[in-house]
């Protein structure tokens, strides 16, 4: 059994900066605080949070949408990869970042219950507020 959910938060940076950081080894590592290896192209494999997460970039719409397969160290061999869709919507305060996470193993509620906030949105706010 799997489930889907959606979380969002306001980040104080324009969509193009967030998009570029998400798809950059240096940027992704800096904005989350965990080591990452990411490429900017469809088909590129990635890892994040010191190897805790890995997957592949499946679709890109420059500066507005990123779709990646997503698998954490908690997934077992029985679990299929989950998928994230990151939507970036610019506004007067920066960007509303919305993550739709689908096909998450039913016993792994931590992503929805603060995981995205703690591991991505909160450190991203700090990183992008530095300017």
Image (cartoon, rainbow, N blue to C red):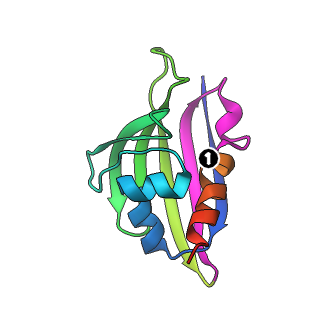
> Residue under circle 1?
119
Q: Nearer the viewer, residue 99 or 45?
A: 45
Residues drawn in magenta: 93-115
- Residue drawn where x is 56% and y is 69% of the image: 128
Q: Nearer the viewer, residue 49 or 42?
A: 49
Q: Quadrant of residue 19?
A: bottom left
Q: Is residue 112 visible?
A: yes
Residue extending furthest right?
Answer: 113
Q: How many marks?
A: 1
Q: Quadrant of residue 37?
A: top left
- Residue drawn where x is 39% and y is 65% of the image: 20
Locate residue 116 relative to residue 46 in the image: left or right. right
Residue 9 within the magenta-colored segment of the rendering: no
- Residue drawn where x is 47% and y is 35% of the image: 53
x and y, in percent, of residue 93 in the image: 64, 80
Q: Residues within 10 Å of mark 1 (few under 14, many from 20)?
A: some
Residue 100 within the magenta-colored segment of the rendering: yes
Q: Is residue 23 visible?
A: no
x and y, in percent, of residue 38 in the image: 35, 49
- Residue drawn where x is 44% and y is 67% of the image: 64
Q: Quadrant of the C terminus?
A: bottom right
Q: The residue tagged with tag 1: helix, strand or loop?
A: helix
x and y, in percent, of residue 62 in the image: 35, 67
Residue extending furthest bottom?
Answer: 92
Q: Nearer the viewer, residue 7 or 36?
A: 36
């Amino acid at each position: 059994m799997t489930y889907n959910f959606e979380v969002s938060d306001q980040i104080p940076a324009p969509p193009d900066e967030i998009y570029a950081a998400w798809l950059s080894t240096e940027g992704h590592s800096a904005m989350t605080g965990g080591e990452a290896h990411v490429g900017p192209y469809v088909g590129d494999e990635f890892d994040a949070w010191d190897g805790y997460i890995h997957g592949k970039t499946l679709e890109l719409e420059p500066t507005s949408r990123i779709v990646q397969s997503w698998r954490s160290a908690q997934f077992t061999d029985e679990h299929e990869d989950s998928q994230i869709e990151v939507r970036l919507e610019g506004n007067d305060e920066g960007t509303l970042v919305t993550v739709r996470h689908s096909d998450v193993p039913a016993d792994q509620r931590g992503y929805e219950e603060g995981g995205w906030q703690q591991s991505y949105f909160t450190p991203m706010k700090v990183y992008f507020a530095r300017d």
